[in-house]
């Protein structure tokens, strides 16, 4: 959904709230899952939201819902997965505009040096110069993919990968 359509949908009359969920405020080389928003675009989002909507915390939203006192055009800002860029980039922008936000931290991974599977997959498939002819994941899904002529990265494939989006055929 385009940001303009999103902002238009937030402006409908009546008391209602929307929750905007972000993952990463970053400009990664590859973003096939489209989880990232550039820092400049994020600053523009927050500036627009602060100027045109009632930005509230999730705690405030819950309280208003419990008391049936929802403020018109309310928006909550949330972040999933606790990427480092949320602290380094998003937090100062949120503070600059005095915007509350909620950060959901997957506590299971706090003491582990692991990346999320979707980030590991991007790193493996898009930056590994030579891949095996067959890629298998033994899990409940028993996933298998044959790279064939795509097993060796070249400039053409790197550019093709840069444009690929999750949900499209590989």
Image: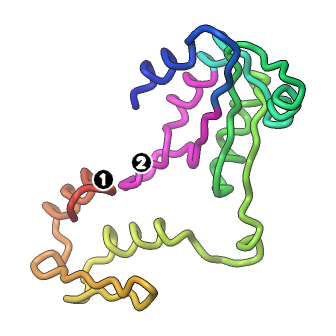
Q: Which residue is mark 2?
A: 34
Which disc number belongs to residue 61? none
- Residue 127 percent coordinates (x, y): 33, 70
Mark 1 surroundings: few (<14), some (14-19) or many (≥20) residues within 10 A: some
Q: Quadrant of the C terminus?
A: bottom left
Q: Which residues are magenta?
A: 19-46
Residue at the spot of label 1: 165
Question: Residue 62 vs residue 37: left or right?
Answer: right
Q: Is residue 21 above or below residue 152?
A: above
| Vertical position of residue 39 compared to residue 9: above or below | below
Q: Are marks 1 and 2 in contact (CB under 8 Å)?
A: yes
Looking at the picture, how far across and down is residue 106, in whole percent? Answer: 71, 64
Of residues 87 and 167, the one drawn nearer to the viewer in this rendering: 167
Camera-side residue of 6 and 96 = 6
Q: Residue at x 19, y 83 (%)?
A: 146
- Magenta includes 28? yes
Question: Dot 2, crowdedness within 10 Å: few (<14), some or many (≥20)?
Answer: few
Q: Quadrant of the N terminus?
A: top left
Residue shown at the point (56%, 43%) measured from the top left: 25
Picture quadrant of residue 46: top right
- Residue 148 seen in the figure: yes
User: Does the stretch in magenta take in 168?
Assistant: no
């Amino acid at each position: 959904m385009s940001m303009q359509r999103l902002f238009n949908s937030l402006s409908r009359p009546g008391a209602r709230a929307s929750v905007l969920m972000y993952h990463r405020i970053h400009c990664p080389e590859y973003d096939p899952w489209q989880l990232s928003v550039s820092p400049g675009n994020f600053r523009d989002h927050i500036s627009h939201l602060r100027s045109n909507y009632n930005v509230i915390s999730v705690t405030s939203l819950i309280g208003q819902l419990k008391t049936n006192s929802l403020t018109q055009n309310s928006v909550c800002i949330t972040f999933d997965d606790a990427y480092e860029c949320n602290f380094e980039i998003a937090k100062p922008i949120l503070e600059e505009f005095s915007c509350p936000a909620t950060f959901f931290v997957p506590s299971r991974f706090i003491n582990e040096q692991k990346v999320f599977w979707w980030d590991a997959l991007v790193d493996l498939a898009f930056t590994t110069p030579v891949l095996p002819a067959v890629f298998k994941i033994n899990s409940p899904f028993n996933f298998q993919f044959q790279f064939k002529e795509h097993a060796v990265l070249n400039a053409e494939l790197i550019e093709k990968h840069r444009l690929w989006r999750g949900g499209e055929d590989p």
